[in-house]
Amino acid sequence: MKKRIAIFASGSGSNAQKLMEHFKRSNEIEISLVLTNNADAYVLQRADNFEIPTHIFDKNEFYKTDEVIDLLKNLEIDFVVLAGFLWLIPKNLIHAYPGRIVNIHPAILPKFGGKGMYGDHVHNAVMAAGETEGGITIHYVNENYDEGEYIYQAKYRIDKSDNLEMVKFKGQQLEHQHYPRVVETIVKKISK
């Protein structure tokens, strides 16, 4: 029986797409659900292109009820992957999936992490600090933004001539290269 992944995303979903592509032909793992807090998120179209069911939820449903957890349990979801999901994960979801929720962050943590540090905010902060390296961190999720145990980090060089788009591009290349592979390695190790 395949292990089942749910992806949470808030926006475009380029990492979600790479995960969908990666697991499309897997005999062991499948993307079973894409969830979002944004009814206009392009990730919904990406999921539809792969014929993956979606669920849109609001703050009340996510933070004040167990509806999202009940949905995950009913669909026998084994693992949760955050792919550009901007809300803090509530304790009840973390307790329902202990050690089974991962996130990708567009910097080498612990630098440039925490509340409000996502997307271009991170890249702009890295550039403003004059860093010569950028990178990504894949980590387990706990009750705080970007503070869970690190699983994998990778770096890229920032040249003096790099603008925001170039830094973003270099980071996304690393994300798309490593996130599906790292997720697959972790999911294969968990027991059903």
Image (cartoon, helix red, strand yellow):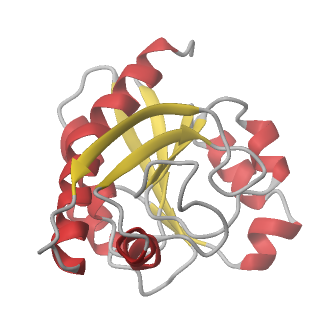
The quadrant of the rendering that contains the N terminus is top left
Let me know if residue 50 appears in the view. Answer: no
Q: Quadrant of residue 180?
A: top left
Q: Residue furthest left?
A: 161
In the picture provided, is 104 more to the left or to the right than 144? left
In the picture provided, is 128 more to the left or to the right than 69? left
Residue drawn 74% across the image and 77% down it: 59
Estimate the x, y position of residue 150 in percent, counting from the top left.
55, 34
**Label tally:** 0
Residue drawn 33% across the image and 20% down it: 28
Above or below, comparing residue 30 to residue 64 in the picture: above
Residue drawn 33% across the image and 74% down it: 12
Estimate the x, y position of residue 163 in percent, counting from the top left.
19, 79
Estimate the x, y position of residue 113 in percent, counting from the top left.
58, 60
Above or below, comparing residue 102 to residue 106 in the picture: above
Q: Residue furthest right?
A: 64
The quadrant of the rendering that contains the C terminus is top right
Q: Residue furthest bottom?
A: 40
In the picture provided, is 94 more to the left or to the right than 120? right
